Amino acid sequence: MAILSAAAVAFILKVLLALRTYGTNDVYAWERFAHWSALFGSRLYSIDPAFNHPPSMIHVLAAMTWLAKTTGIFFPFWLRLPAILADSASLWIVYRMFADRLHEPVVRWGLLLLAISPVLILVSGFHGNTDPVVMFFLLVAVRFTQTGKSDVWSGAAFGAAMCVKILPVIVLPVLFFARPGLRRRAIFLGSAAAVMLVCWSPYIFRDPAAIAHQVLGYQSLYGHWGLPWVAYRLAFFRDAWHEAFQRYGSWVVLTIIAFAAWAINRRPGKPAVYAQTGAAFFFFLAATNGFGVQYLAWLVPWTVGVELIPVAFFTIAGGAFLFAVYNYWSGGFLWYLADSNYVGDWVGHIDYLLTLCWLSVIVLALSAWKRKPSLPGLRTGFISFAAAMILVVYPVWNQVARVDKRTYAPAVDHAAVTGIHAQEYAMLSAEYLKMSRYTEAVVAARTGAALDPAVLDVWNALTQACIRLGRFDEALNAANNAIQIAPDDAIANANLAEVLNEKAGVGQSPRRPF
């Protein structure tokens, strides 16, 4: 009953966050992907270097756009709803996998922490990305693998996860080597490939090179977490070493995971596939060279059955770190828009919570292989709770109430979102200009100017588009608007000079007889 109540509370909190906030900068990136994929299809991979998701997501984005238009509920809600539903479904799957161990207190407490996880509340309800959906499909694949009933359905679930993001390759060796015999492994891989081929169509056939480059070549942010974060603070660590670590670090970690999966599954009495998958994710995030804060959601569904104190340590430290980061990006509480592109990396006072969170992941990775975790005694639990209050709760409260408290009205966030959308219409107009589609460039620039006339780039784009169409009066008006916004802007001044030259040339040219 406690687990169900916790899950219901978490679900309500996530839905309220999804309805009442916009989310992070990932949300407006997804909005742009949805809009541009409807216009350009697979060409989006060549146009927008930020789109590194499987082409199957183009279908999903079209559905989300339709839902937003049909219901009148804004796109950010529909982007986050699949993750919210996936969390609930993931809890049910994990509950079923541990059905024969529910008498163990460590399992019941683990399920309770999973149900009420602050990491999932913040990532699924606020952040705005698809990572929890990937974990749901992976849990389905692991469930079928552990029961040994269907390699076809296990492969199909793994393929579905690969249709959301390619991060499941991290644990592919675990699911591959966990099933004995080449035939079963081939069925698993074939089923996954079939699902991917169907869902990635037709785009995979239209521009396979661009899709492979964008999706398979993706690298997350370096230096924001873990070993690279430490390396940046070591004076002797050379730039060439950073470059090598950034390029090859993940491959080293994946190689270690693959070798460990091969070795472990050759032994009798091997751990359950669920435990192996969780350990692989824990190790990857402890040692990886790239990071995004939403990656913490990868770990939560695999914490059940692990020693309780490490799980509680990660639950508290991960939630505190995420809360601090989102609060900083949001400009303080109450939240609406958390724009890291504008605010920038978190500052030094959050590094303390980052360190605690990273240490909690390391402890989680070290604890993952303990076969019979025990429940801590009352004294140990009390000391751990007191330590958490001192190490985590007060620093977070100090940041929210004093260091990063809101200094401007929340309405500024709404205006910022409008400005971001206007800027993206300017980007769209610029892309149309590259394609010599000048009429569409004018329409896009005008749309951006209508949203926020203070955005310089929309007027610069409109000037160029109107010049190409010979609409010099409109071009002159747009150029003058750009100059008013930024008198010293080089592009605006160059556009104005070009318009004046073009108008002078037209005025001097002889009129054609009718």
Image: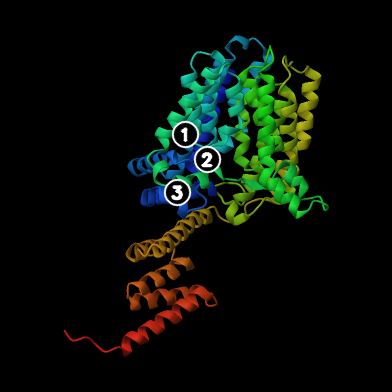
Q: Secondary structure at mark 1?
A: helix
Residue 407 left/right relative to 152: right
Q: Position of residue 117 (x, y in %)?
A: 61, 30
- Nearest the eye: 453 or 354: 354
Q: Please name the residue shown 52% across and 43% down the image.
A: 215
Residue 152 left/right relative to 341: left
Colouring? rainbow
Q: Nearer the viewer, mark 2 or mark 3?
A: 3
What amino acid does circle 3 point to?
Answer: Phe
Q: Please name the residue shown 58% across and 46% down the image.
A: 334
The residue singled out by tag 2 in the image is: 129
Choose top left, top right, bottom left or bottom right for residue 480. Answer: bottom left
Q: Position of residue 279 (x, y in %)?
A: 67, 26
Q: Secondary structure at mark 2?
A: loop
What amino acid does circle 2 point to?
Answer: Asn
Most distant residue in the right direction:
236
Q: Position of residue 159 (x, y in %)?
A: 48, 29
* Image quadrant in which the N terminus is located: top right
The residue singled out by tag 3 in the image is: 33
Residue 380 left/right relative to 105: right
Cα distance in 3D space between marks 3 and 1: 17 Å
- Nearest the eye: 139 or 181: 181
Mark 2 vs mark 3: which is more N-terminal?
3
What amino acid does circle 1 point to?
Answer: Pro
Establish if 342 lies above or below 258.
below
The residue singled out by tag 1 in the image is: 82
Q: Please name the residue shown 56% across and 21% down the image.
A: 142
Most distant residue in the front direction:
182
- Nearest the eye: 93 or 486: 93
Cα distance in 3D space between marks 1 and 2: 9 Å
Mark 1 vs mark 2: which is more N-terminal?
1
Establish if 124 lies above or below 52.
above
